[in-house]
Structures are given as C-alpha cells and as structure tokens.
Image (tube, rainbow, N blue to C red):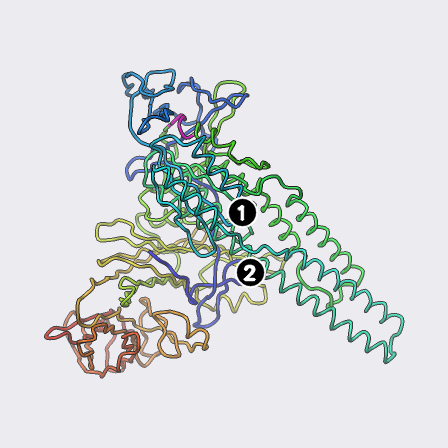
C-alpha cells in the first residue's frame, strides 16, 4: 500500500502544523511522535506478554542454567507473576542441514510439561523438547562513506565464516533517501548471501555530508566582526559622509553573511531530517516485514550514526516500539570504526558559538540589525550533534530492543560470535499483566535475575494495543487506537471524516482519506515566557475490510506551536488531515479518531468506501464528491498529483455537514469518469437524480466533456437548494455502459 502526503495535510508553523484561517485548511508537513516499545502477543480476549532474555556472567559468557525462580519481572514497577518459562536453544552444528530449536519444558505452575531427550549439540541443563525452525537474520546497510562501506562489507563477509549456521535464513537490505533496496531476499544459500553482501558493499552510498554547521558558524562570526566594525565607525565618525557610506557598505556585507548563514543552517536542518527519516523508515520497513515470523528475529544494522534531530526523535521511538512488538532484536554496528574526533566536539563548538552570539548581542545593546535568530536554536543544534554520536542513537536502538552496539573498532566481525550466541540461546518468559487495559499507554518492563554478577539483556517495554494491526504501531498512535476500541465511541470533539475512491488506470485502488475538525475545538496552552501557544493532538484513520480486519492505518501527530499574536486567527481555521492509500477491490469501513493529548478529549467518526474491481471495458466512476468549498491553485500547486484538482482549483469535500438554504444557494458536486478503453466511445452524457426516502424526486441530464490525455472526464456542477424542503436527500449520478448504468451516489442534509 502506498500513501502520499498532499498539500492538504496540516503543515508546520513551528514543529508540525499551521492552522489556516477562515474556511481554508491546514497544510504542509508534520512530524510523528512518542515513547517506546513492545514485543508481546496481545490477543483479543487474553493478554500475554512475552519477554526474551539473554543473561551473561562477568566474563561475558552466557548463563545457561537458570530456572523460572531465578527471574523477577516487573511492569511499571509492579511485580508480575511469570506464567510460563522456557529455555530456547537453536542447534549450533554447522554440518546440520537445518537447525533445531531446543526448548526446555515449561515451568508454569499451572501445567508442567514432561521432559524429553535433548536434540541439540549444546542442550540446556534441563531436559528439552525439540522444534524445528531456523534463525532469521536481516543485514541492513544504511548510507555509508566509502571507508565505512568497506568496513561493513568485511564484517558481513566475516559472518559467513564465523557466524553462519547451516539452515539460517539471511536477507540483505540497503537504505537510501527514497527507498529500501533488497540486495538479497531471505535465503539459506551461502553463495547468494555473499552476493547480497557484495551488492550492498558496492551500492550502500552515503549522502554528501558537507560541514554545513561549520560554514554557518563561520558566517555568523564574520557577521559579528562586521557588526563590531559598524559600531566602531558609527561612534567615531557620526554624521560624516564617508563614515555613512562605509557603514552602509559594511551593513550590506553583514546582512548578506547572516542571510547566507540562515540559508546554510536551514538546509542543514532539512537535510538531517531527511536522512533521519530515511533511516528510521528503512528500519521500520524491515521490522514490519519480520513481524509475521514466529520467535526472536535479528537485525544487524550497519550505520555511521543516526541523524536524530528533534523532528525525527518521535519516529525513532516508534521504530523501537515496533521492533519490540514484533520480537525483533537490533544489533547496531558503527561502521565508522575508530574515530579520532567525536561528535561531542561538534556539540561543544555549537555551544561556544551560541555563547559568542549572546555576548555579542549584549555588547551591541541588542540592536535589531544583528542576527535575530533565537538563541535556543544553538542549543537545539548542539543537542542534535550529541544525538549523532553512535553511542547515543545506535546504542539506544540496540539496548532498548535487547541487542548491543559494537563501536570504536575497525574489526566489526568480532561481534558476530556474540550475536550468534544470543540468537541461539535465550530464556523466554511470559506473564499476564496486572494492568490488562489495552489503553495504548507505554508499559516499562524490568527483568532481574537472582544471581550476583550477571548482566541482563532484554526489551524495555511495550505499547498496550491489540496485535492485529496491518502496519507498525507508532508510539503516538497507541492512545488513539485505544480510543477506536472504546465502547461507546467518544464524541467529545466536532469532527468529520471521509474516504473516497478514484479508480485511475494505474492505481485502481487509489483512496484519499480526509479528517476535518475546527481548530477552536483543540486546547491551546500559553507559554507566557516564550509568547507562544502550544497544542498537541493526533489523528489516526483505520481502514477495515468486510470481515473487520485492519488493512491499513494512516496517522499523524501534530505538536503545534503558535505565536501568541496569531492564536485568534488560528482558532478561526480548520484542521484538514489528508493522506492516501491503495486498496484491493472490496467494501471498507473507515474509522477515524482525533485525540487531544492535553485534555485527553477524543472523537471517532466513521465512513464507508467501495473500491470496484477492474473492468475489461466501459467507464469507471470515482466517488461522487459533495463540495464544501473550492480554492484556486498556483501554477506549481496545479502540477502536483491530486485527484481533487479540478482545472486551476482544488475542491474540498463536505464530509457530512448539513447545507443551510439560508447560507448557500446550491450543493456543489464533483466526479471523475475514467475511460481507458480505446475501442469504446466515451460517454457523452450523465444523468443526475435527487432521491428522498429512496425514491427519485427529480431527474436531469448533463453533457460530459471530452476525456483528457489521461482518459479522465472531470465533471463539476451545482444543485440548487431553493426548491428542496429541509430533510435528508441522496444525489445520484449515472453514466451509460452499454445497456446498463454505472452509478455513484452521496447523501446530504438540507436545513432551513
């Protein structure tokens, strides 16, 4: 399924979005969000949390002789009762054609299992039951510099000699800015695996990493020096003509330095966001692919450091949450090897530059002509630089999913023996949480072992949501999904939602999804010191098929920051969420929820959409869209692909609001007729009917235009309201298809 964020999606007036005034919408990009992770299996009626645990002694050796009584599990600091305990060990016989899982008998107090003979080369101390199944490991190469690429390639090849066990399934993947590359699909064929590593070593290119921060600091310093010269000249030769000319020339030079500094700084932030989202999206894609496989899965992730800007952090936390929920352990390898200069030096430079700017502003009396960027920007840039340290982002990713980070070495292959050990031997605990509510909250997990001098490696927590999800659950989505599960569903915020079908020739299942609510319904909190208002809300739209199964989920988190002088204009606007998906033919139910995290108020709205099957001939109709408003587009906006573009305008659907005869004279409508069959003549006329209580009350015909180059006939019109009494109506539009009619209809309400 694909999704596109169009111009209709709420934008960012600060961190994530800007609410436009009047009948306009909120446009642009927005960032995701929230805390940690999960591994468990949550059923509809039961909730069992599974935790896989690796334990090592002081010398780094696996501890293999623990029993259930040695473990203590706590959730949110509340001790839990272990209901099932197993020792899982995969065979390490490299000559074996297929490894076997060796599982110690359950030590559940409810139903102990009998002991059977061990079937592994190195069985656990207790008896074991056998179960076949290979270990699954995905190698993921992020964008790497040439030297790091060579390091990662050597390490990966070392795995084939020192880590691979016959029968293990290995996949090789690579990340770039736009996509995830499959260098080798999962296979046990060693020749194919080596070929995948070779392709990754050649193609895992790094983005150009120019020193933009240093350039920006140098330009700032030049501007400060020039500003000091201006101040000196102004004081020494006030009123002199030649002094005024010199001051004017220096002022232009200073302003250009500051302008270039701002440009370079902005490009640096955008570039780092782009790299960070590419990395997190790539990891998330692999995690999502692995989640359907049973047992513990492994990702070996080669990177030179994650770009975790403040905008990317929320998505990063969601990756950890998804990995833990899917029982995926990430082992991160810093392919940069030994580093002479760390990222802490970059952070220190940012702090020093910020202090110099502050001193300069104080000395200049805070003149408006100096750099007017907020001083907090320097702190943010310093914080971003600290997050670049592989020991920060990569270490957190590995630690919180139960793995480890291998860093500060040019021989990354040394970690594979340890990775293989942990893939092949671990303890599996399960418990029924005392807090059984599936409320979308994050639950922390702590595992302790009743033995001195040992280290415990396990996951750190999970999101309390149902497991039957089509796409990974991002952390901000947890509370919103819980809202969708409430009975009865809340209606605390005024909102509307719709899903539309636009069966284009190359995207027959194209479905735009929209959610709308007035900005005034949200809570805004004033920060008097910063003179800004903040809001924090999320929108999640879930699509279910006729059997009630989730087939896709779209969502976005909106942390808003609004200048105080713009708050009233903001509240007069509407928030419009717009994303797209592609669905197979069938009938679907849209369930959309808005959740205001500041007040915990929420609302749910539903709608239905039908995606038709492909036809050999004849026209196809899009959904019949009743209009709320239209807006003229710029030439650049018209060039964008959006099914709601009509000529030089964009149409905004009415998602269920009544039409008042006193306010509007007519109901506008919009439909697209698709004609892909070159042999059949396109329809030239459509029939429009008004129905009340299922019976036609009026009928008329309207001519259709000629198809455009894409085979589309876009039709718009208006239905006068003056003769319609208040009540419920249906508008139906039909076009001929041989002796039959192809129809679409939409309901609407007329008020006085």
In the image, farthest residue toward the right? 236
The x and y percentages for residue 519 are 46, 63
Q: Quadrant of residue 707?
A: bottom left
The vertical placement of 501 against 422, above or below, is below
Res. 89 in view: no
Residue 14: mark: 2
Q: Quadrant of residue 292?
A: top left
* Quadrant, the C terminus: bottom left
Residue indicated by mark 1? 306
The x and y percentages for residue 503 are 26, 66
Residue found at x 36% / y 16%: 126
- The mark closer to the camera, 2 or 1, is 1
Residue 573 vs residue 582: left or right?
right
Residue 14 vs residue 681: left or right?
right
- Observer-nearest residue: 84 or 90? 90
Stretch in magenta:
423-429
Residue found at x 52% / y 69%: 569
């Amino acid at each position: 399924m694909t999704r596109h964020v169009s111009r209709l999606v709420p934008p960012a007036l600060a961190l994530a979005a800007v609410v436009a005034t009047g009948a306009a919408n909120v446009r642009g990009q927005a960032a995701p969000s929230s805390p940690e992770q999960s591994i468990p299996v949550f059923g509809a009626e039961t909730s069992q949390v599974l935790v896989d645990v690796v334990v090592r002694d002081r010398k780094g050796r696996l501890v293999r002789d623990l029993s259930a009584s040695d473990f203590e599990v706590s959730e949110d600091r509340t001790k839990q009762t272990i209901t099932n305990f197993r020792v899982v060990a995969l065979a390490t016989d490299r000559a074996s054609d297929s490894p076997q899982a060796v599982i110690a008998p359950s030590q559940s107090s409810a139903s102990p299992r009998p002991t059977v003979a061990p079937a592994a080369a190195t069985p656990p101390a207790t008896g074991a039951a056998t179960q076949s199944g290979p270990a699954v490991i995905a190698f993921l190469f992020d964008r790497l510099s040439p030297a790091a690429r060579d390091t990662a390639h050597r390490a990966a090849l070392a795995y084939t000699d020192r880590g691979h066990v016959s029968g293990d399934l290995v996949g090789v993947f690579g990340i770039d800015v736009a996509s995830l590359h499959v260098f080798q699909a999962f296979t046990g064929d060693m020749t194919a695996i080596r070929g995948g590593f070779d392709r990754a070593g050649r193609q895992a290119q790094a983005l150009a990493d120019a020193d933009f921060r240093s350039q920006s600091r140098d330009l700032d310093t030049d501007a400060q020096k020039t500003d000091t010269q201006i101040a000196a000249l102004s004081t020494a030769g006030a009123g002199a003509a030649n002094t005024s000319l010199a001051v004017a020339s220096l002022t232009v030079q200073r302003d250009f330095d500051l302008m270039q500094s701002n440009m370079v700084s902005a490009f640096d932030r955008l570039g780092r966001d782009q790299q960070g989202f590419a990395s997190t999206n790539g990891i998330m894609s692999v995690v999502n692919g692995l989640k359907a496989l049973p047992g513990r899965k492994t990702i070996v992730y080669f990177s030179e450091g994650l770009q975790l800007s403040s905008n990317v952090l929320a998505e990063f936390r969601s990756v950890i949450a998804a990995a833990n929920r899917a029982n995926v352990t990430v082992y991160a390898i810093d392919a940069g090897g030994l580093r002479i200069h760390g990222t802490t030096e970059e952070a220190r430079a940012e702090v020093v530059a910020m202090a110099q700017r502050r001193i300069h502003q104080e000395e200049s009396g805070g003149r408006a002509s100096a750099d007017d960027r907020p001083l907090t920007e320097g702190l943010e840039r310093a914080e971003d630089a600290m997050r670049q340290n592989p020991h920060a982002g990569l270490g957190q990713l590995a630690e919180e999913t139960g793995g480890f980070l291998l860093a500060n070495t040019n021989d990354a292959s040394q970690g594979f023996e340890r990775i293989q050990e942990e893939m092949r031997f671990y303890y599996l605990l399960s418990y029924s949480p005392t807090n059984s509510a599936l409320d979308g909250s994050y639950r922390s997990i702590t595992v302790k072992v009743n033995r001195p001098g040992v280290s415990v490696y396990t996951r750190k927590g999970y999101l309390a949501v149902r497991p039957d999800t089509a796409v990974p659950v991002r952390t901000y989505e947890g509370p919103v999904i819980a809202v969708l599960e409430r009975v009865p569903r809340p209606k605390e915020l005024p909102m509307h939602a719709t899903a539309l079908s636009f069966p284009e020739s190359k995207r027959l299942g194209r479905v735009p999804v929209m959610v709308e609510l007035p900005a005034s319904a949200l809570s805004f909190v004033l920060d008097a010191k910063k003179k800004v208002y903040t809001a924090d809300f999320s929108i999640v739209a879930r699509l279910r098929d006729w059997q009630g199964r989730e087939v896709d989920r779209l969502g976005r988190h909106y942390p808003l920051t609004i200048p105080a002088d713009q708050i009233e204009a903001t509240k007069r606007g509407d928030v419009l969420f717009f994303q797209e998906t592609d669905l197979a033919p069938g009938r679907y139910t849209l369930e959309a929820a808005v959740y205001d995290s500041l007040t915990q108020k929420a609302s749910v709205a539903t709608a239905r959409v039908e995606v038709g099957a492909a036809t050999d001939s004849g026209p196809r109709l899009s959904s019949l869209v009743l209009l709320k408003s239209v807006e003229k587009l710029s030439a650049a906006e018209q060039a964008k692909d959006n099914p709601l573009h009509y000529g030089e305008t964009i149409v905004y659907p009415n998602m269920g609001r009544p039409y008042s005869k006193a306010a509007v004279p007519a109901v506008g409508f919009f439909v697209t007729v698709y004609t892909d069959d070159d042999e059949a003549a396109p329809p030239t006329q459509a029939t429009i009917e008004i129905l009340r209580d299922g019976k036609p009350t009026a009928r008329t015909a309207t001519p259709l235009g000629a198809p455009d180059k894409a085979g589309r006939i876009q039709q718009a019109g208006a239905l006068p309201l003056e003769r319609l009494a208040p009540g419920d109506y249906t508008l139906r539009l039909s076009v001929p298809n041989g002796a039959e009619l192809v129809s679409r209809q939409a309901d609407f309400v007329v008020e006085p």
